[in-house]
Image (tube, rainbow, N blue to C red):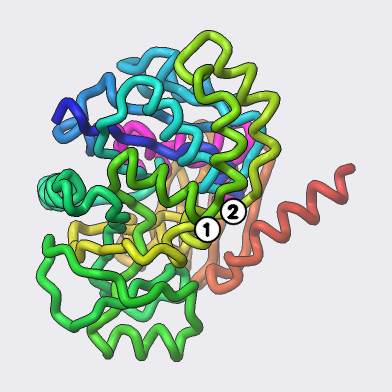
Amino acid sequence: MQNNYCIIMAGGIGSRFWPVSKTECPKQFIDILGTGKSFIRSTFERFLPVVPPQNFLVVTNAMYKDLVLRHLPELNERQVLCEPMRRNTAPCIAYAAYHILSKTADANIVVAPADHLVTNETEFQRIITAGFNFVSQPENSNALLTIGIKPSRPETGYGYIQTPDAGCPNGQVTKVASFTEKPNLEKATQFLQNGRYLWNSGIFIWTLQGILNALNTHIPQITAVFDTGKNIFGSADEQAFINQNFGSCPDISIDYGVMEKSPHTYTIPADFGWSDIGTWGSLFVHAAKDNANNAVKGNAMLVNTQNSVVNVENGVEAIVQGLDQCLVAFSGNSLIVCRLADEQKIKEWVAQLNAKKQ
């Protein structure tokens, strides 16, 4: 366990959860589900049984460093890696990998977003442990393992992993046949019926040398940037080096840049009550409901309203009447009322609103 590391990616701004999630305090630092814990706090606690606290790294935007330390007081400042700008997941993961390399060349690493939901944490920890055991075997040192989730519906918001055979047991590692980006409903329905497809959770497990080799092979533009400061990582000059050079990395995801190109990709099927709570609609699926199938948070009275999400901040009173399958969210000085079916447009609408203000 002492060689196990966890990289938590916490740099997003969560614009699809506007107005509750805003740039100054995005969703990973908010208790959107009403559990009493923020997403990042829940993620940290979920990994603690399999990763020692000193082996956690959080990669985030520089503006969120204090927020991370406030939510995770067990960490010290050196465990919060600050990106000067957003460059997608491949540079984020490379940054953390080079930081770990300054401490040890022998590490097993799990990478996870800060804002996922897991309801069966015991099963989650069993799967993560099985993944660590797999990549730690010498013959699997270059393996790139992604957690695949057994699909329960034809979801169009997730990427998919194709496995060689249908019915692979949970926890049994298998090769990846192919990756598919977010499909349309027809294709997602075919994937569900086929039995060989899993949701791509975006949770990865590999060795330090395995991911460094893969990055060097498939995105050498990134390793070339970090190699120039290889002896600086872990020192007092690391942040200055990152501030000066991070922007030279290409803006590319680890999925597109490495996983879809590598011949060493594996998956481990799992079912631990996972969801990428990326939208109000996904929150609606998992939130507690009232008798009219409404997910309500805050002091709101609903009249002739059903199948809706109503989220108002503390200190606000609201009356909502006559809505069906809608979203009402109020925070600070911002309000949104829209149909849940149109929530994918929220990010676009927020951009238009900000442009109008300017």
Question: Does residue 152 appear anywhere in the picture?
Answer: yes
Compared to residue 324, the image places residue 142 above or below, namely: above
Q: Is residue 191 above or below residue 118?
A: below
Q: How far across and how far down the image is residue 112, in percent?
A: 36, 45
In the displayed structure, does residue 17 sit left or right of residue 109?
right
| Label 1 neighbour load within 10 Å: few <14, some 14-19, many 20+ | some
What mark, if any, has residue 278 been given in the picture?
none
Give residue 320's quadrant in the image: bottom right
Which one is in front, 328 or 44?
44
Q: Quadrant of the N terminus?
A: top left
Which quarter shows the C terminus?
top right
Element under disc 2: loop
Q: CA distance from mark 1 to mark 2?
A: 6 Å
The residue type indicated by label 2 comes to Ile
Do the numbered discs 1 and 2 sit on residues whose CB atoms are within 8 Å? yes
- Is 347 magenta? The answer is no
- Label 1 sits on a secondary structure element that is helix
Horizontally, is 35 left or right of 86 in the view?
Answer: left
Residue that badge 1 annotates: 257
User: Which image quadrant for residue 322?
Assistant: bottom right
24 drawn magenta: yes
Question: Image quadrant of residue 76?
Answer: top left
Q: Say which residue appears at 52% left-offset and 44% top-offset.
A: 312
> At x 51% / y 47%, what residue is drawn?
89
Q: Earlier in the sequence, mark 1 or mark 2?
A: 2
Q: Report x, y in % for residue 278.
A: 47, 56
Disc 2 target residue: 252
**Residue extent of the magenta highlight:** 17-44
Residue 104 relative to residue 294: left or right: left
- Please state if 272 lies on the left or on the right of 34 as rendered: left
